[in-house]
């Protein structure tokens, strides 16, 4: 089991270790995954045409750190999940400039 999958499994079953394992997830993310996660957290929801890396987005979705959503009545957007925010904060990630709803 990968570092990320193992840490996510611990987050799901252990309330006491939820925040500790969130930092482990952050450490296991690639630089592309981290950049997309920050984009979703601080500039999201993000339209597909503006996603920095579609493959990193798909991986974040598979981890439960991102989800597809509608924005202002339109489909084709991705947003960060609550779990993603915890992973970012516990991993002590560096925020990027805030910009709401990167619309296509």
Image (spheres, rainbow, N blue to C red):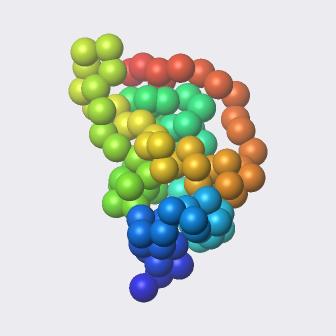
- Of the pair 70 and 10, the residue shown nearer to us: 10
Residue 103 vertical position relative to residue 13 in the rendered view, above or below: above
The residue sitting at 30% across, 39% down in the picture is 68
**Residue 98 in the image, given as x and y percentages of width and height:** 65, 25
Q: Can I make out residue 70 in this image? A: yes
The residue sitting at 51% across, 38% down in the picture is 40
The residue sitting at 59% across, 54% down in the picture is 87
The residue sitting at 51% across, 62% down in the picture is 15
Locate the C terminus by quadrant: top left
Residue 48 vertical position relative to residue 33 in the rendered view, above or below: above
**Residue 44 in the image, given as x and y percentages of width and height:** 49, 30
Residue 58 vertical position relative to residue 82 in the rendered view, above or below: below
Marker count (numbered): 0
Residue located farthest toward the top when viewing the structure as drawn = 72
**Residue 72 in the image, given as x and y percentages of width and height:** 32, 14
Residue located farthest toward the bottom when viewing the structure as drawn = 1
Q: Residue 77, located in which quarter of the rendered image?
A: top left
Residue located farthest toward the front when viewing the structure as drawn = 16
Locate the N terminus by quadrant: bottom left
Residue 56 vertical position relative to residue 85 in the rendered view, above or below: below
Q: Can I make out residue 26 in this image? A: no
Q: Is residue 93 left or right of residue 75?
A: right
**Residue 38 in the image, given as x and y percentages of width and height:** 60, 42
């Amino acid at each position: 089991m990968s570092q990320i999958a193992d840490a996510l499994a611990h987050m799901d079953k252990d309330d006491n270790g939820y925040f500790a394992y969130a930092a482990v997830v952050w450490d296991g993310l690639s630089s592309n995954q981290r950049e997309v996660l920050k984009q979703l957290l601080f500039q999201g929801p993000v339209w597909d045409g503006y996603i920095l890396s579609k493959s990193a987005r798909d991986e974040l979705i598979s981890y439960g750190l991102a989800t597809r959503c509608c924005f202002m009545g339109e489909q084709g957007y991705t947003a960060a999940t609550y779990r993603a925010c915890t992973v970012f904060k516990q991993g002590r990630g560096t925020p990027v400039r805030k910009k709401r709803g990167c619309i296509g």
